[in-house]
Image (cartoon, grey):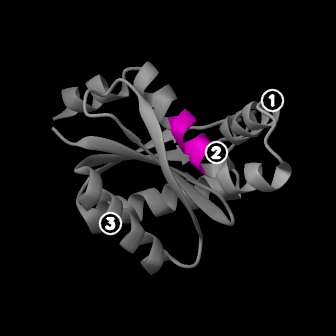
Amino acid sequence: MGRTLAFDIGEKRTGAAITDQLYITAQAVGVRERVGYKSEVAWVRELMQKYDIERIVVGHPVGLSGQLGERAVACASIAKKLGEELGLEVVLWDERLTTAEADSTMKQAGLSRKKRKKSVDQMAAQLILSGWLACGGHETSEEKK
């Protein structure tokens, strides 16, 4: 059985995290500057091959009011394109406040603003994936098959 890969897609950077093979934990695996869709898909393919990925979870930044803003619409569009292009299940996961939570956690750990800026997106991806796992995302996805 393969793993699940999650992304926190920001305006400037995308963070990535993967599940362990038993679907118990999530680990951050990288962050990348956003330079264009083709380059991002190449990175996704590298991660898929390296970690035996069978599913992708994309953070969906729904507003606190439940409204879909510009970022949420863009992330949904990217998720749909990825699913079609890669032939994998791609799940949108509500990621309200994960970036703020990641930044706060790193601030409490004493990381400088510069270090937080470089790592916040991958930590947010890890939080997205942890939330998905905690809510039984893996079991729900397996039931769909």
Q: How crowded is mark 3: few (under 14 residues within 10 Å), some or many (20 or more)?
A: few
Residue type at the position of mark 3: Glu
Image height check: is 111 above or below 113? above
On residue 108, the disc is 1
Mark 1, Cα crowd under 10 Å, few <14 / some 14-19 / many 20+, is few
Q: Which residue occupies 70% across, 52% down? A: 69
Label 2: which residue? Answer: 61
**Would you say 134 lies left or right of 144 here?**
right
Marks 1 and 2, the one that precedes in the sequence: 2
In the image: residue 115, left or right of residue 29: right
Compared across the picture, whether 69 is left or right of 75 comes to right
Query: Residues in magenta?
Result: 122-128
**Helix, strand or loop at mark 2:** loop
Q: Determine the residue positioned at 66% across, 36% down.
A: 98
- Disc 1 to disc 2, how far (Cα)? 24 Å
- Mark 3 lies on residue: 46
Is residue 54 located in the magenta-colored stretch of the structure?
no
Q: Are marks 1 and 2 in contact (CB under 8 Å)?
A: no
Residue 91 percent location from the top left of the image: 39, 43
Specify the quadrant that holds the C terminus: top left
* Depth order, front residue of 77/40: 40
Marks 3/1: CA distance? 33 Å
Q: In which quarter of the image is residue 3?
A: top left
Disc 2, disc 3: CB below 8 Å?
A: no
